[in-house]
């Protein structure tokens, strides 16, 4: 369907079965803004060329992607995904000016089995939304397969458990801290945690590829499984002792954190071996959950790093 309006042509595609409740003067505006590709009328002696329409385009908000996949963006997030042997990916979009930076970021990793598609920056803006800091690169990747808790516990390091923390940026920041301090995994309750998204991956800055997210149906049972595996479970909340390492010296620790405002739920709190808080002599009584997770992990490393952590740290190149 073509509309000629004020000397310009609008090519409109209205999908079969699409319903539009707008009537009167709002109908034309709705059709143009939702379904049209803008074209200028041809000037004398020049032919009109229809702009290429991206098949990967999305509406405002989360970028659209086929089921079971998501768009990852940003140099660190994309490079980490390309270097992750567990990650399956389908398309790689990169601007010409950012292609060398991506090549450098993946130089030491596995062979990248996808041909980069050079695109204009505007195409990535249209695909990912105006607020996405994509740094000129985007990757269409399959959602990572879930890792069972017992398999994740084979990795060295402390464990983080989140009780109904739902903000993807907070979880991404927590994953980043978990990677920095050598945590084994991040355990979340499946129905009360966000899915893997571009926003979460961007906030994690590559840590989504290195720290497994374990999704459990019942968080209390997951805590019980951690205890049976030898973990000392510490609920990070007010009203307990100070997290000083006295009670878990030499033992592997699982830190359990609740949502901001609500804190730990009663059953989760009762399932923990200990309730402890962070030493905060200032006037603030609470911290953002991602900040609290980082400080808690630092305290574990500083005060009571078990031998398992030390062995893992010794293997890291300096």
Image (cartoon, grey):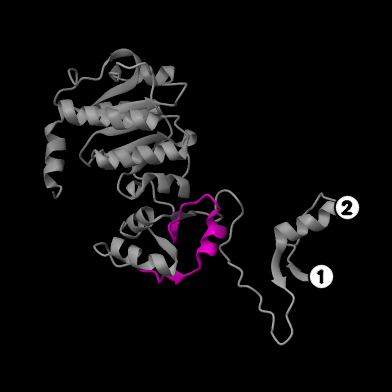
> Mark 1 or 2 closer to N-term?
1
The magenta segment is 113-142
Q: Residues within 10 Å of mark 1 (few under 14, many from 20)?
A: few
Left/right of residue 310 with respect to residue 232 in the rendered view: left
Q: Is residue 51 above or below residue 18?
A: below
Tell me the SS state at disc 1.
strand
User: Residue 250: where, in percent of width, then height?
Assistant: 14, 26
- Label disc, if present, on residue 24 of the rendered structure: 2
Tell me the SS state at disc 2.
loop
- Label disc, if present, on residue 4 of the rendered structure: 1
Q: Is residue 166 visible?
A: yes
Residue at horizontal 22%, vertical 27%?
A: 299
Residue 10 among magenta residues: no
Marks 1/2 in contact by CB < 8 Å: the verdict is no
Q: Which quarter of the rendering shows the N terminus?
A: bottom right
Residue 140 among magenta residues: yes
């Amino acid at each position: 369907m073509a509309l000629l309006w004020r000397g310009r042509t609008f090519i409109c595609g209205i999908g079969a079965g699409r319903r539009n409740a707008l009537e009167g003067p709002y109908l034309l505006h709705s059709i143009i803004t939702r379904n049209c590709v803008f074209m200028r009328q041809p000037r004398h002696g020049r032919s009109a060329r229809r702009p290429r329409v991206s098949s990967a385009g999305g509406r405002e908000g989360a970028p659209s992607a086929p089921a079971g996949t998501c768009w990852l963006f940003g140099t660190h997030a994309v490079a980490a995904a390309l270097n992750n042997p567990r990650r399956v990916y389908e398309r790689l979009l990169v601007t010409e000016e950012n292609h060398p930076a991506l090549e450098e970021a993946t130089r030491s990793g596995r062979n990248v089995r996808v041909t980069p598609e050079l695109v204009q920056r505007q195409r990535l803006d249209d695909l990912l939304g105006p607020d996405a800091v994509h740094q000129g690169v985007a990757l269409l990747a399959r959602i990572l397969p879930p890792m069972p808790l017992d398999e994740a516990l084979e990795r060295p390091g402390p464990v983080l458990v989140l009780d109904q923390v739902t903000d993807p940026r907070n979880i991404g920041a927590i994953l980043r801290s978990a990677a920095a301090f050598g945590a084994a995994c991040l355990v979340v309750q499946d129905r009360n945690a966000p899915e893997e998204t571009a926003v979460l991956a961007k906030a994690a800055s590559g840590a989504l590829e290195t720290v497994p997210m374990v999704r459990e149906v019942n968080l209390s049972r997951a805590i019980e499984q951690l205890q049976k595996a030898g973990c000392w479970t510490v609920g990070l909340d007010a009203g307990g002792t100070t997290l000083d390492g006295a009670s878990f010296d030499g033992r592997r620790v699982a830190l359990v954190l609740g949502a901001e405002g609500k804190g730990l739920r009663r059953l989760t709190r009762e399932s923990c071996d200990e309730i402890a808080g962070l030493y905060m002599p200032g006037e603030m009584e609470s911290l953002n959950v991602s900040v609290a997770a980082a400080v808690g992990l630092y305290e574990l490393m500083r005060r009571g790093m078990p031998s398992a952590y030390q062995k893992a740290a010794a293997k890291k190149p300096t």
